[in-house]
Amino acid sequence: MARGNQRDKAREANLKKQAAQKKGNTMTGTEMQRAKESAAEIMRQKQAAGTTSPPPRHIVLQISPSPLVM
């Protein structure tokens, strides 16, 4: 009898897990595409206005050995 209870518990847990997955993305494909295009247009406007910071630059330091090493 314990096996039946285990099966029911697993079924309940699986249903709960599937319900949580369905909550993730509610946009359709066209809505998602419009949202991406809107975000891209906003970024283009910001870049044209110069309000975004440039990408970070890496500084490379060259260390030469000192001539007084003995």
Image: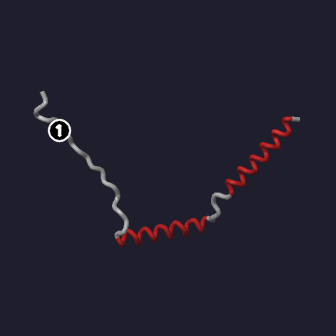
Which residue: 10% across, 32% down?
68
Measuring from the top left, give residue 29's x and y in whole percent: 61, 64
Q: Is residue 12 above or below residue 28?
A: above
**How many callouts does the rendering have?**
1
Which residue: 50% across, 70% down?
38
Q: Judge left or right: residue 10 versus residue 29.
A: right
Which residue: 21% across, 42% down?
62
Q: Is residue 20 above or below residue 70?
A: below
Which residue: 13% across, 30% down?
69
Element type where label 1 sits in the image? loop
Measuring from the top left, give residue 66's x and y in whole percent: 14, 35
Q: Is residue 48 above or below residue 18?
A: below
Could you say which quadrant of the image residue 61 lies in?
Answer: top left
Q: Judge left or right: residue 15 versus residue 28.
A: right
Q: Judge left or right: residue 43 versus residue 66.
A: right
Q: What is the residue that sits farthest to the right in this orientation?
A: 1
Disc 1: which residue: 64
Q: What is the residue that sits farthest to the top in this orientation?
A: 70
- Residue type at numbered disc 1: Ser
Measuring from the top left, give residue 12's x and y in whole percent: 78, 47
Q: Residues within 10 Å of mark 1 (few under 14, many from 20)?
A: few
Q: Quadrant of the N terminus?
A: top right
Could you say which quadrant of the image residue 7 lies in?
Answer: top right
Q: What is the residue that sits farthest to the left in this orientation?
A: 68
Q: Quadrant of the C terminus?
A: top left
Q: Judge left or right: residue 35 versus residue 26.
A: left
Measuring from the top left, give residue 35's x and y in whole percent: 54, 68
